[in-house]
Image (cartoon, rainbow, N blue to C red):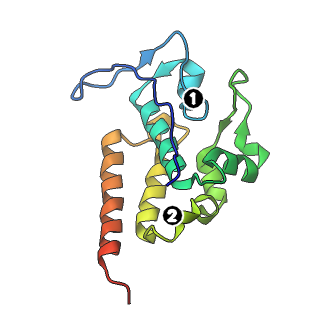
Amino acid sequence: MVPKLSHLGFSLQGPLLRSKAKPIKVDMMIGTPGFMAPEYVLTKTFTDKCDVYSFGIVLMVVLSTSYKQSFFEKMYMMADSDLFLEEPLYLMTPYVDIPSFLERISVDEIIDPVLLGKIAPECLGVFIDITKRCLSKDANERPDMGEVQVELEQALALQEDEDACPEP
């Protein structure tokens, strides 16, 4: 198994679960470049949709990082320069339009080869769809975290169904 994540040490305490989410304005931006939502980088305002974006990056990293390359390394090697937006210039890495990147390439090109033959195609389709939606540039187009959970549970059920079927 390849370790795929590190340093998830930043959190803000927001409203209680049943409360309406409120944006939080911060004085200093904290986070890992590449994992931060574009609107957080531009406005220093953190919302529940920023969490959804960051979780989408986590999903991509888990799916695609291998012993040889991280998701970000694969993306830089394969992407056209027009996917990299140079604004804002103060970032360590430019914002990358990941949904456009995923539309231009085959999932087979970025998925961890160890996982490629093990994930049921229907499961992978649901997983990729919810991941793309989490990574939408427009925060309003991103799903709520509850919807992400439901979709991932559906993907898991599809995988479990596939695993339960004996091979011919």
- Spatial distance from mark 2 to mark 1, Cα to Cα? 26 Å
Mark 2 vs mark 1: in front? 2
Q: Quadrant of residue 52?
A: top left
Q: Which residue is mark 2?
A: 115
Residue at x 61% of width, y 46% of height: 98
Other-residue count near label 2 (Cα within 10 Å), few / some / many at <14 / 14–19 / ≥20: few
Residue 103 vertical placement versus 73 (above, below):
below
In this view, the residue in front, 86 or 166, is 166
Q: Earlier in the sequence, mark 2 or mark 1?
A: 1
Give the percent coordinates (x, y) of residue 23.
40, 20
Q: Which residue is mark 1?
A: 32
Give the percent coordinates (x, y) of residue 107.
58, 62
Residue type, mark 1 in image: Thr
Question: In the image, 101: left or right of 160?
Answer: right
In this view, the residue in front, 5 or 95, is 5
Q: Quadrant of residue 66?
A: bottom right
> Regarding mark 2 in the picture, which secondary structure is present there?
helix
Residue at x 61% of width, y 30% of height: 33
Other-residue count near label 1 (Cα within 10 Å), few / some / many at <14 / 14–19 / ≥20: some
Farthest top residue? 27
Q: Name the mark on residue 131.
A: none
Q: Can residue 20 be seen in the rendering of this structure?
A: yes
Farthest right residue? 81
Residue 36 vertical placement versus 25 (above, below):
below
> Regarding mark 1 in the picture, which secondary structure is present there?
loop
Residue type, mark 2 in image: Leu
